[in-house]
Amino acid sequence: MSLPFENNDEFTYGSYLMVPELLSLQRCVSHDPATGQPEHDETLFIVIHQVYELWFKQILHEVDFIIGALDEDRISAAQNHLKRVLKILKTLVGQLDVLETMTPAEFASFRDFLANASGFQSAQFRELEFVLGIKDRIQLDWFTGDEGARLHHRYESPTVWDAFVGVLHRQGAPVPAELLERDVTEPVVENPDLQAVIIDRYGDEGFAGLCETLTDLDEGLQEWRYRHVMMVKRTIGTKMGTGGSDGAAYLATTLFRPAFPDLWAVRTAF
């Protein structure tokens, strides 16, 4: 089977991946008065955060597939793509190692040029939180236009956890009725009755595997949050974050907030 670019000289690696356009998107805003050039480390800062956004896009793409697979009771397909998301989360954590090669002084050399730009303004990360069930209505006011529309859609849509509960219900498990009819705009909270159902079914190897992979996903997200907090502390200490955010102080409040609290609560029952 031939590839398209083998028969078309105009269709190349660069044109397919739009490499020239991609490499033109790292537009520094800093200015070193001594050299007239942008500060050296701003390019690294931009590249890493652009790559984050690309990975967020892929995670959302995968999570949408996972929800669809669960809704169709294709458990193995859902679990395989959950494992892919886990690998991506590990990659996100690994990128922080690269960012931490930048010293506080090097970051300070261009930080003021960022003005009101802040990671808090990442609509895709908020989408990821929402699709995992970590929903906060206040965050909807932070975004307008296409970003706001996407976030509203995520806010009003069922989550990964709702899809998981649906699988249990269709398999005949006595899922509490209030979970099948719950307001999906509300955060996912612990439900002791559902925990009893999960515990009862943990002897099923396939079911336990799905639960463990979902727990891995939750842990992976929390690992990324923790490393992100420590990176911010290492870079700016307790200073206010860019865009007027509380910086590390706010990020620390997001730690240890599980997306799937029931899967953590059942651990004490074994």
Image (cartoon, rainbow, N blue to C red):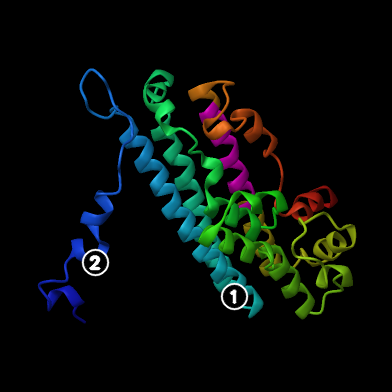
Q: Looking at the picture, how far across and down is residue 136, in whole percent?
A: 71, 51
According to the picture, the residue beneath numbered tag 1 turns out to be: 69
Could you give the CA–CA distance between mark 2 and mark 1, rounded to whole angstroms? 29 Å
* Disc assigned to residue 16: 2
Q: Is residue 261 above or below residue 210?
A: above
Q: Is residue 106 left or right of residue 187?
A: left
Residue located 43% across and 29% down the image: 100
The region drawn magenta spans 217-232
Residue located 49% across and 54% down the image: 56
Q: Looking at the picture, how far across and down is residue 43, in whole percent?
A: 31, 36
Q: Is residue 29 above or below residue 213?
A: above
Label 2 environment density (alpha carbons within 10 Å; few <14, some 14–19, many ≥20): few
Q: Looking at the picture, how far across and down is residue 172, in whole percent?
A: 81, 79
Q: Secondary structure at mark 2?
A: helix
Residue 227 belongs to the span the image colors magenta: yes
Give, as a three-letter code, the residue at label 1: Ala
